[in-house]
Amino acid sequence: MVKKETSRVLDLNPPSLPKRHHIILKFLISFLLLGLAFRLFVSDSLSFFTSSVVEAPPPLVEETNVVIEPPLPATSAGDLLSVNESKSIPNEEISMSFNASNGECDLFVGDWVPDPSAPVYTNSSCRDIEAHQNCMMNGRPDSGYLYWRWNPRSCELPRFDPEKFLDLMKNKWWAFIGDSISRNHVQSFLCILSQVEQAVEVYHDEQYKSKRWHFPSHNFTLSVIWSPFLLKADIFEDINGVSSAETQLHLDKLDKTWTDQYENFDYAVIAGGKWFLKTAIYHENGTVTGCHSCLGKNLTEMSFEYAYRRALKSILDFMMGSGQKAFVFLRTTTPDHFENGEWFSGGTCNRTGPFKEGEVDMKDVDAEMRGIEMEEFEKASIVGAENGVTLKLLDTTRMSMLRPDGHPGPYRQFQPFAKDKNAKVQNDCLHWCLPGPIDSWNDILMEMVIRGAH
């Protein structure tokens, strides 16, 4: 091929050239053509190799439960409920960016990734775990749910540093205000802090639902205030969630249980929502205005959305305008994971690993509730900024939605299958085992405090 091309090019040379020059020229042209062919071949080869390296997808890494052998040595059912309807929520709508205007990453968009390190506390090292959340003590046989951590996609999330936190919070007062999920949350908080200093319980109400602790070495006070509606409410439920009468809910009056103490708080974490799905008679301006889910009553049926929005607006208006310049967190609604029924009809949660993105949809009721929280948060944060009050969104809904494996299930009770392995027991698929996924809420909480301090 090269010879043929070379002779064709040589035919273009004038015949008057001397024979020696003709031979030299023939050699030079042959050499140049061979060099050109080699360069083209190498260039094409490198181009193909480079493009294949750049475009090849990364190898898939299979995520599996990490179980360390041996495994580590529920709050009232009145809080348990579920609605089966669900809808898909686009990822960009699932979480609001935390301080996105400041270029900070969104702590709430991420994935649960395997973490072989042990939890920072155990049910043996922490004495503040209530029996219904003490899954290991109650006989839960698996421990893989303990070995995952929340990993934001665009930044690192450090573990909660209890020593650093207590040093920052000397002479401060924190309050968690809400229902039994808030009580669940504060137990995780206490267990992490107990690695540095054991809190002294200085108060509890008659039902042990509201408590207060003191950390003497740091003069740090921590409260949990049980106020499931955050409004004035007359509730007639027993520990199993059975009502002897409809709840009387005053939509225009806040619960004095927490408002009378509010001036003491430097930090407050508020949350609610689930109780608004229950049957209730609504009161406004001193009169009954309607009800929710009250069959057989000659009253106007009103939606839980109406009641929850009105309540949340009143709560945030009070906090933003009270004159107490607290650092306020609004925690978004917590999804449950009941399958094949509800808490009262045999629903279970037997999964042993997290969902991945796209494997589960947000239920309609959670989407509606969270939507209300987002809208009222946006409006209140503007007022708060004008009044010198810090309001942050603790948007734990999506990350919690991905953890069906972290609930007590049947192990809200001690050894539920000890006498009968096929026993019919009530499951808790709303609250969280301790230790468990809820500990990551506190990792985020501390990171938000650190960011907010700068």
Image (cartoon, rainbow, N blue to C red):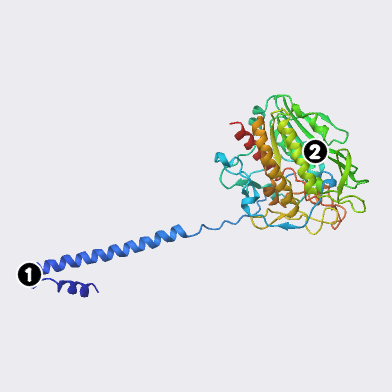
Give the amino acid type for the residue marked by disc 2 in the picture: Leu
Left-right relation of 217 to 35: right
| Residue 17 numbered tag | 1
Where residue 337 sits in the image (x, y, percent)? Answer: 75, 53
Badge 1, how many Cα within 10 Å: few under 14, some, many 20+? few
In the image, is residue 331 above or below residue 163? below
In the displayed structure, does residue 381 sit left or right of residue 424? left
| Nearest to the observer: residue 230 or residue 166 | 230
Q: Give the residue displayed 72% in from the left and 43% down from the top.
A: 435
**Can residue 194 be seen in this snapshot?**
no
Circle 2 residue:
230
Q: Position of residue 75 (x, y in %)?
A: 82, 43
In this rendering, the label closer to the viewer, 1 or 2 = 2
Amino acid found under the numbered disc labelled 1: Leu
Residue at horizontal 82 percent and vertical 32 percent from the top: 256
Q: CA distance from mark 1 to mark 2?
A: 105 Å
Is 389 drawn above or below residue 76 in the view shown?
Answer: above
Closer to the camera in the image, 397 or 55? 397
Drawn side of residue 70 relative to residue 203, left or right: left
Front-most of residues 324 and 112: 324
Quarter of the image that includes the N terminus? bottom left
